[in-house]
Image (cartoon, rainbow, N blue to C red):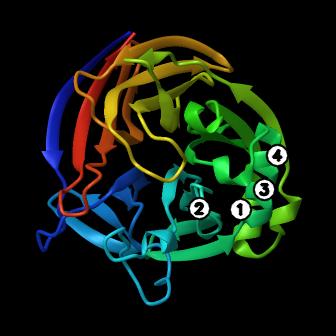
Amino acid sequence: MRLDVSGTSVMTFDDNSPVRAASAIAPFGDGWLVVQDDASHAAWVRPGSTTAVRVVEPVEGYDVFSTDAGTKHLKPDFEAACDVGSGVLLLGSGSSPARMRASLVRLGPSFTVADLTPLYRAVAAALGLHEDQLNLEGACLVGDRLRWFQRANLAAGAPTGSVDVDLAGLLAALTGTGEPDAIAVGAVRRYDLGAIDGVALAITDAVALPGGRVLVSAAAEDTPNAVDDGPVVGAAVALLDDDAVLAVAALPAADKVEGLAVAESRADGVRLVAVVDADDPDVPSRRLDLRLTW
């Protein structure tokens, strides 16, 4: 498996402000919805234009969140985005009580937010984790299930894994026709993606491929817990088939790819769009165009 970078660009809104802390990407209308994990708005990236789309109401009056402002603990921290047909489903990381929400963003645009704390607790239990070890950063559809990926942090005792969640039940909870504690949590899988310079590769996002396989992005980030950032010593993508790791391909640079989407699927590989978080709110996130061949 070979991975090549065919293009790179910085992402800014039409007013030249940076698209900050890009954490996920999904198809949306005639473009892409790029999630900012420290803001109440996402970026709708379309040909010739990038505009803000609200995905959650202000939190205690704030629309952006940062360590310097003392508001990082308030951020929704949406880390996964998945096209579910009726809209784009955004999922919080679960790394704190404030981050156990989901938002369903529809064209219009409009959004619906729900507190899914009972589901997050059930996912933590299924993965054998304490709640403060959760760091769910990627999700994709596999059949009628949402496969939700836990980002590893071996220093905190949390291995890389995934859990399958009933999508219909999750969407019912979001739309008010079901309850979060009634969402079925199913199969658990574990993955060993290897390490770079002694730091384990941990899944940062996931996309489903034809035939049931899953492609994940991964970063080797040296951090002691599920909340704090750390130095990224390497990055890669990995091809998964059920719980088997079929192949791993390194990125040419230690880019912290936080979001991954399929632009085109072909018999010999896929074209991908990835977003890279600079871990600095003043530095625009970058878009990478990738070509993966089998």
Q: Which mark is residue 125?
A: 4
Closer-to-camera residue (202/270): 202
Closer-to-camera residue (212/290): 290
Circle 1/circle 2 CB separation < 8 Å? yes
Q: Position of residue 43 (x, y in %)?
A: 31, 64
Q: Nearer the viewer, mark 3 or mark 1?
A: 3
* Outermost residue, left side: 16
Give residue 108's quadrant in the image: bottom left
Q: Nearer the viewer, mark 3 or mark 2?
A: 3
Q: Residue at x 41, y 34 (%)?
A: 222
Closer-to-camera residue (9/136): 136
**Numbered marks: total:** 4
Residue holding disc 3: 121
| 152 in relation to 138, above or below | above
Q: Nearer the viewer, mark 4 or mark 1?
A: 4
Residue holding disc 1: 171
Q: Position of residue 178 (x, y in %)?
A: 83, 69
